Amino acid sequence: MQWLNYHHLLYFWVVAREGSIARACEKLHLAQPTISAQLSRLERSLGEKLFRREGRNLVLTDAGQLVYSYAEEIFALGQELTGSLKGMARNRPLPFHVGVAEVLPKLIAYRLLQAALRIPQRVHMVCREERPEQLLGDLAVHRLDVVLSDAPANPSSHVRVFNHLLGQCGVTFFAAPALARERKKGFPNSLDGAPFLMPTAHAALRRNLELWFESKEIQPVICAEFEDSALLKIFGKAGEGIFAAPSVVAAEIEQQYGVEALGSSEELIERFYAISVDRKLRHPAVIAISEAARHSIFA
């Protein structure tokens, strides 16, 4: 099968429209010998002369008129195709694959991800929740656009990533109303000997709480440990123990779980990160998360 060279056809089409090789050279930003050589090759491949000279002008032959009519249709269809694809790109939702470290409080994750869904472009978000080390592996091979975590990626990790601090806040302590009333007076010393619900060792908050308790010489009674922060709060709602959470979502925790705040500490600091493979954030949804964190959530 003999294939038509569409580059040659394009040069012919532009020459025919412009009426001369010189004007076609200006349009295509090519040298005259280049276009002349391509036209000659097209004529040889088709076995027909496409132009004849009349004075200084090039005029289409009968074969040239036929080829030009096909070229007009071919390049019109090409423009229609690219226009349709651009339209599809505008209408197609922006894919956004995000990994959420399982220890990240759900209310914090929601506040951050909510910003991604409010950008002007429609977003199709796929959210995965796993341990950070598993998420970072998927981030490295571009299965994820970003990982949200309560701690930066470990520098000793073999994965090359960049930590972007989204914000920080203090920590508030909560309990079911009866337990809160019992332990509110004399906070934080009232936490000594109190039933306490702890996040597991994977959470940055766990390590911070242990150091803070030690500095205050407080020894709560650890009743249970949880990887799932939402499950921990449900146990707290049921009166099984006191628990700690980021102060930035204190109002939502009290409203959603029906618990009361005993007190808070600004010595305890919770930090939150967006981890990406890029030194500078690029994905529109991730940029929206960063801006919302900086200007409203942790402001």
Image (cartoon, rainbow, N blue to C red):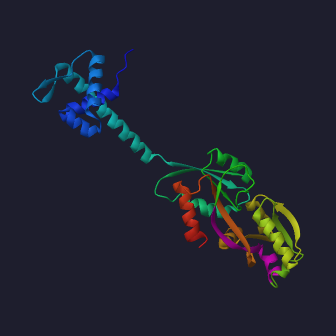
Counting every numbered tag in the picture gives: 0
Q: Is residue 45 left or right of residue 156?
A: left
Q: Which x, y percent locates residue 124? A: 54, 49
Q: Residue at x 18, y 33 (%)?
A: 20
Q: Is residue 214 visible?
A: yes
Residue 50 sits in quarter: top left
Query: Height in image: 121 above or below 216?
Result: above
Q: Residue furthest bottom?
A: 186
Residue 30 sits in quarter: top left
Examine the structure image and report whether residue 176 is included in the region drawn in magenta: yes
Query: Height in image: 260 above or below 5?
Result: below
Identify which residue, 268 or 84, lies in the foreground. Answer: 268
Q: Which residues are magenta?
A: 164-184
Q: Which x, y percent locates residue 57? A: 13, 30
Q: Is residue 278 left or right of residue 149?
A: left
Identify which residue, 138 or 87, lies in the foreground. Answer: 138
Q: Residue at x 65, y 62 (%)?
A: 273
Q: Is residue 241 visible?
A: no
Q: Which x, y percent locates residue 277? A: 62, 52
Examine the structure image and report whether residue 95 is included in the region drawn in magenta: no
Q: Residue at x 70, y 47 (%)?
A: 137
Image quarter in which the N terminus is found: top left
Identify which residue, 266 or 258, lies in the foreground. Answer: 266
Image quarter in which the C terminus is found: bottom right
Q: Residue at x 21, y 35 (%)?
A: 22
Residue 12 sits in quarter: top left
Q: Which x, y percent locates residue 117? A: 53, 57
Q: Is residue 271 left or right of residue 220?
A: left
